[in-house]
Amino acid sequence: MSPARHVVEVALGDRTYDVHIGPGVRDALPEVVARLGARRAAVVSARPREWTPDPGVPSLFLPARDGEHGKSLSAVEDHCRRFADFGLTRADVVVACGGGTTTDTVGLAAALYHRGVAVVHLPTTLLAQVDASVGGKTAVNLPEGKNLVGAYWQPKAVLCDTDYLATLPPRELTNGFGEIARCHFIGAGDLRGLGLAEQIAASVRRKAEVVAADERDSGLRHLLNYGHTLGHALERATDFALRHGEGVAIGTVFAGRLAGMLGRIPEARVTEHLDVVRHYGLPTALPSGVALPELIALMRLDKKATDGLAFVLDGPRGAELVTGVAETEVKEALATMPRDT
């Protein structure tokens, strides 16, 4: 690999795979497909056809569309029916090209079709490269909540081509930094002085460590949800006008405030949460017009909330899952958050 490229291993025994990061890494797709021994490929892409290299085997190109409103069971059914029409078998491969909503939806379709067919991710957004495409979580939304129907299905490889990022609108690029900012508080260290490819690699490396230790969210993997409890609620409350990384950024600021209010961290660490999020140009205030009772009701739907409200919070031992947080304390912390005017 050239100095501008990185390889991060996600160590999961016989399901171990590599995440390739850097310019031009998508061109490795035919090699990956050949190594898998696949005879056919279904390429599901939210990007133009020419953005995905020829997989080197007979292939079906299925256009998709990024966006939370497309993350549905009906989209999964449509993908699977097209796979069947094409004659895709368990010996073949699915390729997902697009943002995090595409890798989530296509990953779930691959997990369900024939009870599991190999999938390779080509994430094209910063958000998808640093988080959504890695770790094997696949899910779609229900009207009742975000990511409520899903499965764990690890990819065979992830190709994070940083050339894709040059095509992103400024807001979408900034959106991806929401997941990088939260890595500061879950053991990745201060990434602010690194180049973009190095920040992506460091974020993926930390996620790989966590996933290797806890693939199915029985404990340590909760760390990856830092800032996400409020973040997901804000996405739902704004009908996804607020993007995922933006919600996570605000949720990270809130996590610092709540941890400080509960006496888990000193005021300087609370301020550090705000400073890191601001560094990346991300929002730090609650959107105007969003009612606190609605946010609390949505946070109760979080999958971690098995005993009252639950949050991943910083503390003397580092970040950890804190369950049974009183609603009064959550309301008080939310009330201290600035409002976007």
Image (cartoon, grey):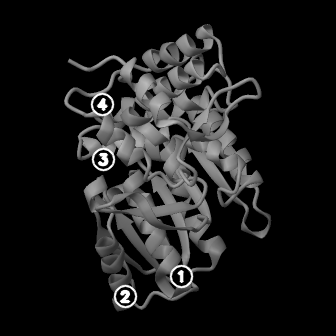
> Front-most of 143 and 120?
143
* Residue 126 visible to an observer of this rendering: no
Labelled disc at residue 14: none
Which residue in the structure is indicated by mark 3? Answer: 236
Nearer the N terminus, badge 4 or badge 1? 1
Nearer the N terminus, badge 1 or badge 2? 2
Nearer the N terminus, badge 4 or badge 2? 2
Which residue in the structure is indicated by mark 4? Answer: 171
Q: Amino acid at mark 2?
A: Phe
Which residue in the structure is indicated by mark 2? Answer: 86
Numbered disc in front, either 4 or 1: 4
Nearer the N terminus, badge 3 or badge 1? 1
Q: Residues within 10 Å of mark 1 (few under 14, many from 20)?
A: some
> Front-most of 50 and 159?
159
Q: Position of residue 113 (x, y in %)?
A: 47, 83
Q: Amino acid at mark 4?
A: Arg
Left or right: residue 181 versus residue 289 is right
Left or right: residue 269 versus residue 279 is right
Q: Quadrant of residue 280?
A: top left
